[in-house]
Image (cartoon, rainbow, N blue to C red):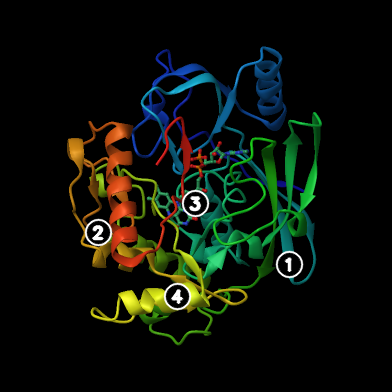
Amino acid sequence: MSDVYAQPTTGPEPATTCELAQYTTLRLGGPAGRVVAGTDADGIVRAVREAAEREEQVLLLAGGSNVVIGDAGFPGTVVLVRSRGLRVVAEDADTVTVRVEAGEPWDDLVATTVANGWSGLECLSGIPGSTGATPIQNVGAYGQEVAETITSVEVHDRVEGTVGSISAADCGFAYRSSIFKYADRWVVLSVDFRLARSPLSGPVRYAELARALGVQVGDQVPLADARATVLRLRAGKGMVLDATDPDTRSVGSFFTNPVLDVAAYELLRERAADIGEPPAWPGAGDVVKISAAWLIDKAGFGKGHLGPQGVAISSKHTLALTNRSGTASTASLVELAREIRDGVHHRFGVTLHPEPILINCTL
Ligand SMILES: Cc1cc2nc3c(=O)[nH]c(=O)nc-3n(C[C@H](O)[C@H](O)[C@H](O)COP(=O)(O)OP(=O)(O)OC[C@H]3O[C@@H](n4cnc5c(N)ncnc54)[C@H](O)[C@@H]3O)c2cc1C
């Protein structure tokens, strides 16, 4: 077991002013009661326990890339997850299991695995935020999701007051979901991933990625090629953070792709008959996953659609709502989200649900 990777913090440290906007990729969010940083697992647990003893509410915040925080902010203690480090905890001829501290920047981890010839995370390149947040919504992109490689998650259980491990089978992983999402019971301290020792990616599952790589769906490609191509595709959609690009001042996809049963899907097809076939993928069981971006676009909300105070749909991706002006409020972003959700429902009878966690604001 060895420390093979550790690096300095990349997120902002607690500041004298506690406007939470400085900690979120949307650059939105009002003041916090208090902000403290946990720089290792013990420090994170201590900060959470101390706040609980003072009977304050606690908000864990890492990269701030999947939260929409209200303009009134958060009255309790915000604990910034700033732990770092990665070590190999098990290995054999074919696999390596790495334990990664919660605050480790996700994309740095992916880059390290690709450089080491560890296959399994390469298609998740370029996703912002921390490693500890990836189990929360079972982060996924381009045909991969973390549920495929996570073996266990070390947590502080705030109800029992204990620290322990939850196996992947008990994490309730599903599409953009797990037992951790919308639950303040667990604080993720570290995550174990089992990765294949291979210079090649897993079989490419996503048609757009296969096309960009010039291969067939199901082919494998060098890890570095998969990573570079995913990064290029994502950058073209404003899905890699770039301080100079206001299209990336977002939470990525604002809405999840709706999952419909067959009857609801047939109803949608009828309502869309005049404009074409809604893009759909078979889901697990008797369900169909629909493209939220298609629904939004066809309901009349195209790329660049403007909302109040300079919030807007990204000019590169219909699913990303952005604080384009940089001076908007959360209320205006939520107003735009409501307009879109209601417009899609009116046109297609399908309800869109937000992907990020809403804190002190509602849709
Ligand atoms: C440009 C852009 C592109 C994106 N693309 C994708 C994508 O392709 N696929 C995808 O799945 N997501 C995507 N996202 C969403 C986001 O990056 C991921 O969900 C990411 O995992 C969030 O990490 P974070 O550290 O920023 O979490 P935060 O936003 O800080 O927190 C998110 C939630 O997790 C909780 N939390 C954070 N850390 C912990 C912890 N250690 N223990 C317990 N709870 C915790 C927080 O309280 C909050 O409820 C994108 C976001 C942006 C801005």
Q: Is disc 1 placed on a helix, strand or loop?
A: strand
Q: x, y (%) of residue 221?
A: 50, 78
Label drawn at residue 316? 2
Residue at mark 1: 95
Q: Residue furthest bottom?
A: 216
Kindly identify the residue that appears in the image at 38 percent across and 73 percent down. 268
Q: Residues within 10 Å of mark 1 (few under 14, many from 20)?
A: some
Query: Alpha-carbon distance for marks 4 and 3?
Result: 36 Å
The answer to whether 232 is drawn above or below residue 58 in the figure is below
Q: Is residue 131 visible?
A: yes
Label drawn at residue 107? 3
The one nearer the camera, 83 or 285, is 285
Camera-nearest label, 3 or 2: 2
Residue at mark 4: 265
Q: x, y (%) of residue 257?
A: 44, 63
Do tag 4 and tag 2 residues touch (Cβ < 8 Å)? no
Q: Is mark 4 within 8 Å of ligand 1?
A: no
